[in-house]
Amino acid sequence: MLTFLREGAAEALFFPQVVRPVRILPRQAFTGGGIELSFPISHTPVEIAPALYEISQTEDRVYVCCGERETKFGMHWAVEYSLGKGDDFLTQRTLFFNPGAEGQPWMSWSNAGVPARPDTVFDFPEGPVLIHDAQIRTIDWETQGPRSQADVCRMTGYFWQKPDCSAFGAFTPSLGVGLYHVADPLQVPGMKLWSDGIGRDEAWVSQYTLDGAQCLEIQTGPLVDQSVKATLQPGQLHEQVEFWIPSLHRRDIRTIALPAPQLRPVEEVPVFAWAREEEVDLWLKLADARKAGDALRIPRAPDVDSNRWAPSGMAELGDA
């Protein structure tokens, strides 16, 4: 995202310029930049696969929306990014919908990759923080937490348990740019910082960047811990709205107000179908043949080595 501000222009999100194989499940590849939306598991299976999208515009707002019906559980996801006239923030609205007859497990985190340099400072709330590095423990952020990227010596995840405010972000003085996030904590209580730090684990980041540049992730979601999953009940629609705020100066997170833009009705957000025809066309034909009771319409079974397995999210196929 190239962030155009009144004072000038700067790149607030990390842009890796390349997609490379990396030992990160489930796709064994990773794009370490932009804003990654995960659903229904961490590191969505379609991060580097084609999804559907739609661009629309009203008199005062532009919408870019993408999504699909995912093949694991058959649930719909859509993420809508919008920018209104005069906005100095990006609005993200996320929708999850379960059209099936059974409740399905899910989790979701929005991961914004930002440039990381030794002087990148962490502007996060006070409160207890769950740390995951070589071990799992809880610290008090104000007295024990790292202040900047230079204070982190290895890859580490930080999960805020009870933050004392709802905004957070990171700012890099040497680049003169930062990115902040704010949301209603009743909708989006999750707050996380992921850093690979300085030293031993920088090579891990260099795997998926073009020139060895480093990035870190500021993350948020509707759950407070990535080890926890929720259940989306049959017919349930989950909606959440959050805001990404680029800045050319370091912000006081306690003075960041929650924006209140006028968005289009939620009914106008597209509900996307299956995104990749090659994964579902054979099985849709099989389901249609079964529904019609016409054995002659049953397609030929795929070769066992073709890796064209029936998507578990297509409930109309019935049990294997």
Image: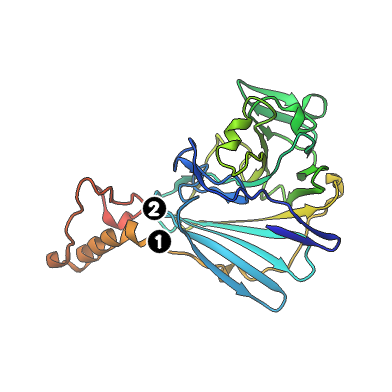
Q: How many marks?
A: 2
Question: Residue type at mark 2?
Answer: Thr
Q: Quarter holding the N terminus?
A: bottom right
Query: Residue 124, percent across and down?
Result: 78, 38
Q: Write the residue at 13% across / 64% down.
A: 295
- In the image, 261 versus 44, the foreground residue is 44
Q: Write the residue at 23% across / 45% down.
A: 305
Left or right, 7 with reference to 87: right
Mark 1 residue crowding within 10 angstroms, few (<14) / some (14–19) / many (20+): some
> What distance separates the C-alpha of mark 1 from that of mark 2?
8 Å
Q: What residue did someone put label 1 on?
A: 274
Query: Residue 194, percent across and down?
Result: 65, 36
Left or right, 287 with reference to 12: left
- In the image, 83 versus 208, the foreground residue is 208
Query: Residue 289, percent across and down?
Result: 20, 65
Assign a secondary structure to mark 1: loop
Q: Residue furthest left?
A: 296
Residue 215, quarter of picture: top right
The answer to whether 301 is drawn above or below residue 265 in the figure is: above
Question: Residue type at mark 1?
Answer: Trp
Q: Do the residues labelled 1 and 2 touch (CB within 8 Å)?
A: yes
- In the image, 87 versus 226, the foreground residue is 87
Q: Write the residue at 64% across / 50% down.
A: 15
Query: Residue 243, percent across and down?
Result: 72, 55
Mark 1 or mark 2: whose residue is earlier in sequence: 2
Q: Write the residue at 56% across / 67% down.
A: 269
The answer to whether 264 is drawn above or below residue 128 in the figure is: below
Q: What residue did someone put label 2 on?
A: 71
Assign a secondary structure to mark 2: loop
The answer to whether 188 is drawn above or below residue 277 in the figure is: above
